[in-house]
Image (spheres, grey):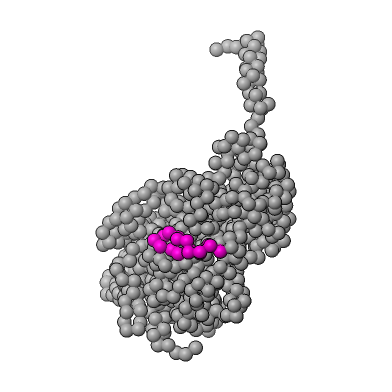
Amino acid sequence: MRIDRKKFLATSSAAAAATAVVGFPAIVGAAPEPIRLGSIPCLTGSNALLGQQEHEGIQLAVDELNARPGKVYNDRPFELVEEDATNDNQSAVAALNKLLGENVSAIVCPVLSTQIQAMAPVMKTHEIPWMTGGTAVKNTQLGVPGLFRLRASDGITAAAMTNFAVKEKHAKKVAIMHASDAFGTGGADQIVLNLKKMNMEPVANEQYPKDAKDFTAEILKIKSAGADALLLYVQNPSDTAIILQQLRSLGFTAPIVGSPSLANQTAMETAGKNANGAYACVDFIVGFNSNVATHFLTAFYQRYHHQPDVGSGSGWVYDAVNCLAAAYKRQHATDPKQTIAALRGTKNWEGVLGKFDCDGEGNMVHAVSVGQIEDAKLNLVMKVTG
Amino acid sequence: MHFDLVANLQLLVSGLAVGSIYALVALGFVLIYNAVGVVNFAQGEFVMLPSYIAVTFLLPAVTVFGTIVHWQLPVIAAYLLVLLLMAGFALLFNRIAYYPLRDRGWLPVVISTIGVSIFLRNLAQLTWGSQPLVMPSLFSADTISLGPLQIRPQYLLVIGVTALLIAFQYLLFERTTLGKQMRATAQDRTTARLIGIRVGRIVAITFVYSALLGTISGLLVAPIFTVTKEMGALIALKAFAASIVGGFGSIPGAIVGGLAIGVIETFGGFYISSAYVDAIAFVILIAVLLVRPQGLFGERVAEKA
């Protein structure tokens, strides 16, 4: 087909006009710019389970906020930018550096305290909100401006664990077993501090190396020290399950009181009957069915067809995203510095993990509870306020 | 610390059981090294992959690629099927990761095995997810009591099966033509080819045998360690150290090295400190290499002037 010059010009003009009519509104009435939210879960490596739980919790919160009228703030949706922290500190720092080049307004950090501490020097140089679930006491004392902890610190949980073992279970010979990472050693140090306040010393304080799978030596040492209670500070659900199995098979019958990760849903399911009867001090109130918690549990199950891990996995990140969105609304801005100020002013905000009140160090959660495990469920034993 | 006989016996059983697993995986390393002259860094995945497959066959419900499967096969059928699948996998591994690179020197093959290792770990995560899986134990009781001694039957099974496999391997290598062909290929591939041994086939059989050793290790430890994508790598690291302590390339060395590391780290954890278990194992490794660079059972090799 031949097109002469006149026809070509006419066709081109019509096409240009059509583009102007159809295309321009898309530019003139462009969708509001999304708020870029960074996230660094451990998606691969031996802590991939925690990363997966974090990813699920964040994605649920982001999708819920984006679906509501007005979206996150002022019709702006969240755009999730995710980088894999894998399993080691170097990878976490590399992921962080990559994310900082992505123009993100806030970052949800990995849950591993060891990675938070490795990332801290870089975090100090950027004044944006850092939302963390790492519970090591030190995390909020690293001098990172804008760091907020969405879970109870090990100071609170370790004190609650120690008090429960000594005062409620009347233990006279307390033993500690913990992982060699920042979470395990930080928690164990806090337990030792609390025991000292009661004029006690642990009869055994067993630290096992990363990736250990046989705990006979540690358990026999604890048994031969005559421990009448064991306080367990272990993050990895697989380690938790194996330790509980080996404690039972080696005939350890004294009360076991674990950190929040003992009540990690996966740890409880993997440990099965070996977890029955063990206590866990968790940074949420067991059985506390607030509207937020009930909605989260229902929405999570409907979407992913499995139970969420409320504490160390999906719950705190869900809270982190919603807490940020609430701060944007309070401050009428998404500017990182203003958001930090708004987050510092968080008072009586209701999340999945309970009531949030920000203290001077950026700690949001101050209440914990002790539960007892029975068939992969945690039943409330007592509430403790930090 | 006073001497407690019961605790020491308990430690010995645990140490031997863990050491047996190191020994089996170390044997896998050594056999492939002897046959083709390279270290197979995917040896740990020869432990992890069959564990995942077995748990998929055995559990009432397992999520595979997001779909729940309910095979729940009888134990014997599941184990045989896993062994068969892993034999097939080893042939494929040999064909893809080793065979095309066999004439390009040792480095490409080593890189290739590292690549397969990373690929398999990621594949496992994508296939089975991140949740640890629990392999059902063959025993109804978690422990059996022998007086004051509480022993896990699974540990006894690990030690027993390892002893049987070592005996089987001895007979295979010493009394059968296939074993002699494998030894001849390991010693000198060119001469083996000259005397009519089909070296390619023997190498493939060595890969299969090595994978089956890994498979048996996986089936033995999965009920104790839980099944995770990292389980093989953790065992392989210690097994690699064990094979060096024993003298890389030496079959008795791999066995003794594996058992020694298992027992020493268990006793070290009890008598010195559990925090330094890995350090103790690797200090011994360094000490052995300083005194006997060729390892405990290795042959002394001198460079010609």
Which of these two is toward me, A203 or A267? A203
Q: Quadrant of residue B134?
A: bottom left
Q: State the residue at coordinates (51%, 80%).
A: A172
Looking at the image, which residue is at 54% across and 77% down?
A205
Residue B80 in view of the camera:
no
Question: Closer to the camera, A330 or B89?
Answer: A330
Residue A377: within the magenta? Answer: yes
Report the span colored magenta.
Answer: A369-384
Q: Does the magenta-highlighted stretch encompass residue A310?
A: no
Q: Is residue A377 visible?
A: yes
Q: Quadrant of residue B80?
A: bottom left
Question: Would residue B48 appear left or right of A167 to someone viewing this image?
Answer: left
Horizontal placement of A231 versus A343: left or right?
Answer: left
Which quadrant would the C terminus of chain B be assigned to in this image? Answer: bottom right
For the image, the number of numbered tags is 0
Specify the farthest residue to the bottom.
B2
Residue B65: % across, % down: 41, 48
Q: Is B23 rendered above or below residue A65?
A: below
Return the x and y of residue B16 as percentages of the image width and height. Answer: 39, 78
The image shows residue A296 at horizontal and vertical percentages of: 51, 48
Residue A308 coordinates in the image, percent (x, y): 48, 52
Q: Residue at x 53, y 75 (%)?
A: A166
Q: Is residue B199 above or below residue A314?
A: below
Magenta stretch: dominant secondary structure: strand
Q: Specify whether A194 is left or right of A226.
A: right
| Residue beneath the point at 58% across and 69% down | A159
